[in-house]
Amino acid sequence: MNSIRGAKNLLALLCAVGIPVALAQPGPGGMRMPRYDTSTETTITGTVQEVIAMNSGRMAGTHLMVKTESGAIEVHLGPNQFLSQAGFQFAKGDAVSIVGSKVTIRGVSALLAREVTKDKKTLTLRDKTGRPMWAGRRQAPSKMSFVLRGGEARRCLAL
């Protein structure tokens, strides 16, 4: 009887400890997505050195390598489709100003962009809390519109 009770207690302990640990593990590829942290928000200005369109994996989307006065940093903008639907494109040599959250990915500093300004036009990628604009309320794309400050459009939900 004691051995059954002991086995049940051990099983309960393993579940209490093991399940949260298992759920906290990184997804496929062994990497967790960094979260936007408003306490690490900063603004950088610089020149686009490279435009990277990653089409698969947990970090899929448009990334920029931006050269600033303090060095180069990889900036994660958002899904390729979101940027193309907004009519926002980037090329090597573009001058940009980016508001974003500093994060560490694979031991390297990076920036999760909230807003990016180019040619006096600003595209909002995340709201002030860091929630991605493409996350929406799971409405059909036809209910989304894009409105850019400075004469073009940035994405807004049409309710």
Image: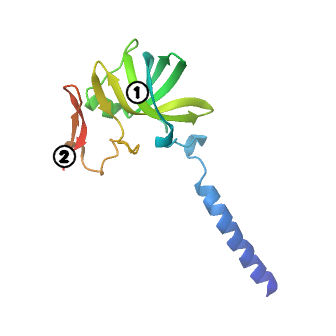
Q: Earlier in the sequence, mark 2 or mark 1?
A: 1
Across the whole image, how many numbered discs are drawn on residues? Answer: 2
Q: CA distance from mark 2 to mark 1?
A: 26 Å
Which numbered dot is residue 60? none
Residue 82: horizontal and vertical position, in percent?
A: 31, 34
Residue 126: horizontal and vertical position, in percent?
A: 36, 39
Q: Residues within 10 Å of mark 1 (few under 14, many from 20)?
A: many
Determine whether the residue tagged by mark 1 lies in a helix, strand or loop: strand
Residue under the image location 40 percent in, 45 percent down: 129
Q: Is residue 69 left or right of residue 92?
A: right
Q: Which residue is mark 1?
A: 98
Residue 94 visible in rendering: yes
Residue under the image location 49 percent in, 31 percent down: 111
Q: Are marks 2 and 1 in contact (CB under 8 Å)?
A: no
Q: Is residue 7 left or right of residue 93?
A: right
Residue under the image location 59 percent in, 53 percent down: 24
Q: Which residue is mark 2?
A: 158
| Residue type beneath disc 2 | Ala
| Residue type beneath disc 1 | Ile
Q: Residues within 10 Å of mark 2 (few under 14, many from 20)?
A: few
Residue 132: horizontal and vertical position, in percent?
A: 37, 42
Q: In the depicted view, which residue is nearer to us: 115 or 143?
A: 115
Between marks 2 and 1 in the image, the one whose residue lies nearer the viewer: 1
The part of the image, by quadrant, that contains residue 62 is: top left
Residue 37 visible in rendering: no
- Residue extending farthest to the top is 93
The part of the image, by quadrant, that contains residue 152 is: top left
Determine whether the residue tagged by mark 2 lies in a helix, strand or loop: loop
Residue under the image location 67 percent in, 62 percent down: 18
Vertical side of 158 occupied by 40: above or below? above
